[in-house]
Image (cartoon, grey):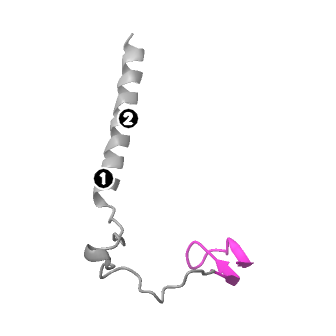
Amino acid sequence: MFQYTTRLSAEVEARFTSVERINQTIEHTPQETDYTAGKAGKASKSAPGPSWPLHGAVTFDDVTVRYRPGLEPVLKKLSFK
């Protein structure tokens, strides 16, 4: 009975720790700006203007990535679109 109670209390503590981490993430993560239309149908000050591109692309050409300086690259000469 003692072993079961000990294991159960450890599991409950682990669940509480998970909830605390979720709450901390929610409280300290900045929210994105709301880009919806403002009053009278006008876009808000932070909304992208009419020249904002409708289509776009991201291209990586011959990229090499390492976790930190001094380590071997984990991705070498990577190219994709």
The amino acid pointed to by label 1 is Gln
Left or right, 5 with reference to 55: left
User: Could you give the CA–CA distance between mark 1 and mark 2, rounded to whole angstroms?
Assistant: 14 Å
Which mark is drawn over residue 66?
A: none
Query: Outermost residue toward the front?
Result: 40
Specify whether 15 is left or right of 27. right
Q: Secondary structure at mark 2?
A: helix
Indicate the secondary structure of the residue bearing disc 1. Answer: helix
Residue nearer the viewer, 4 or 64: 64
Q: Mark 2: give few (<14), some (14-19) or many (20+) Cα within 10 Å.
A: few
Query: Disc 2 designates what residue?
Result: 15
Picture quarter containing residue 25? bottom left
In the image: residue 18, left or right of residue 67: left
- The tag on residue 24 is 1
Please report the residue visible at 34 percent of the width from the left and 73 percent of the height from the top. 37
Seen in the picture, residue 5 relative to 43 is either above or below; the reply is: above
Residue at image position (32%, 54%) is: 26
Reply yes or no: does residue 68 show up in magenta: yes
Q: Quadrant of the N terminus?
A: top left
Residue drawn where x is 33% and y is 65% of the image: 31
Q: Which residues are magenta?
A: 58-81
Three-letter amino acid code of the residue under disc 2: Arg
